[in-house]
Amino acid sequence: MNAAIIFGLLLALMLTGMPISISLGLTVLTFLFTMTDVPIAAVALKLFTGIEKFEIMAIPFFILAGNFLTHGGVARRMINFATSMVGHWHGGLGLAGVLACALFAAVSGSSPATVVAIGSIILPAMVKQGFPKNFGAGIVTTSGALGILIPPSIVMVMYCVATTGHPQAPSIGQMFLAGVVPGLMLAAFLGFTTWFRARKFGYPRLPKASAGQRWHAFRESFWGLLLIVVVMGGIYTGVFTPTEAAAMAAVYAFVVAVFVYRDMPLSRVPKVLLDSASMSAMLLYIITNAVLFSFVMTSEQIPQNMAAWIQSQHLGVWVFLLVVNIVLLAAGNFMEPSSIVLIMAPILFPVAMSLGIDPVHFGILIIVNMEVGMCHPPVGLNLYVASGITKMGITELTVAVWPWLLTMLLFLGLVTYVPAISLWFPRLIGAM
């Protein structure tokens, strides 16, 4: 009964158009003050201790690094490198867009940042070369979602924060490792869809780049690509923690954008810092309220009761994972990824653990669901970002993305029922 009241109130507040963070906070406070005897002091304490986690510091640093890279010319050089490698295949510039999104995702950790950085450069070039506008828009909107699957990923950090406290909670390093193979696989799937449609409709190809041109493009993009080695190599070799890696990434991105490539004058740095602080504050506010929401869920024994009920129904792992996918895809219709992860993970995680599902595999499943949610209406974040770049309406964009969206749904099915896709690499490295 309490669960119905909590979720009913949350849904009612969100339907009024109220921001997710405020809806969460009001739901929790209303419930705590009217239906429980929890002292006010405990609520205030939970607000502060909830975000007093070292891992959370990674979020503002990755956001800052992504903003420096987005404004600092790194994206343009990555596109040039990608074009030199695959531009001569069918749909060359489109394939270069997928590859550039994958590379930029590996340094930014953010899907919207990837869509903006790559899309704003490659889309005009594709239209100029003779590609239909909706073809380029479909590629960038869906390939930009790789930003939250290919590590480092802000949403992966959110998942680890949301499950902290559970004895089987995975580490950020494990999640980053687990995202490598699925991220590369999804990039390959999206690339194949791009190539197949380009070949079918006879879209343009570029002349094959010479070895010299490829070497020049690689040298130009080297400092941006090196960030992947610095961040991921540092984490996996144990030189620094994921949070320290995020701080390193922010400093490195600043140096590359301002002093190496010199695409960003020092006068623009304060604006980048302000934008990053604004986005970080928004996410931290959501986290704070989500921690309170999780506290209420746990105190009311809702996840534990749900786990007991599912086990009593003998639904099995296959059916549970199918239900999880349906719930998360439905949530993606009206919430953005950070909110979904922070609300749903504390509820679903204990149930998944009681059924013997690997916590890392479960995390990757949630992340892939979030990717799909970012690319379909009505609240698909990537759709709105791409709409701003392409000047296309949401309905038009929705039609444009459907071939790639179907590819992502097929990949979601694979990730859901083939845990080895997520777990093979971390086990090979010895992280699990």
Image (cartoon, rainbow, N blue to C red):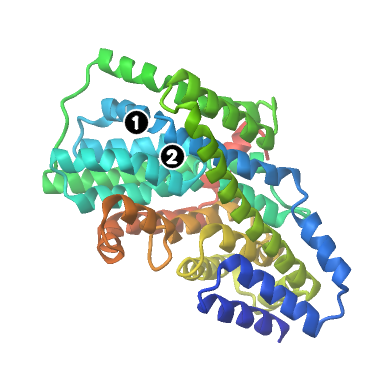
- Residue at (32, 56) in percent of width and height: 387
- Residue at (26, 45) in percent of width and height: 194
User: What's the residue type where badge 1 is placed?
Assistant: Arg
Image quarter in which the C terminus is found? top right
Q: Which residue is mark 2?
A: 184
Q: Quadrant of residue 234?
A: top right
The circle on residue 284 is none
Q: What whole-number distance in Å separates the C-alpha atoms at marks 2 and 1?
A: 21 Å
Q: Which residue is mark 1?
A: 76
Pinpoint residue 214: horizontal percent, then vertical percent: 29, 19
User: In this view of the protein, can residue 427 be seen by the observer?
Assistant: yes
Q: Earlier in the sequence, mark 2 or mark 1?
A: 1
Near mark 1 (Cα within 10 A), the count class, few <14, some 14-19 or many ≥20, is: some
Q: Is residue 352 above or below residue 112?
A: below
Near mark 2 (Cα within 10 A), the count class, few <14, some 14-19 or many ≥20, is: some
Most foreground residue, 218 or 311: 218
| SS of the residue under disc 2 | helix
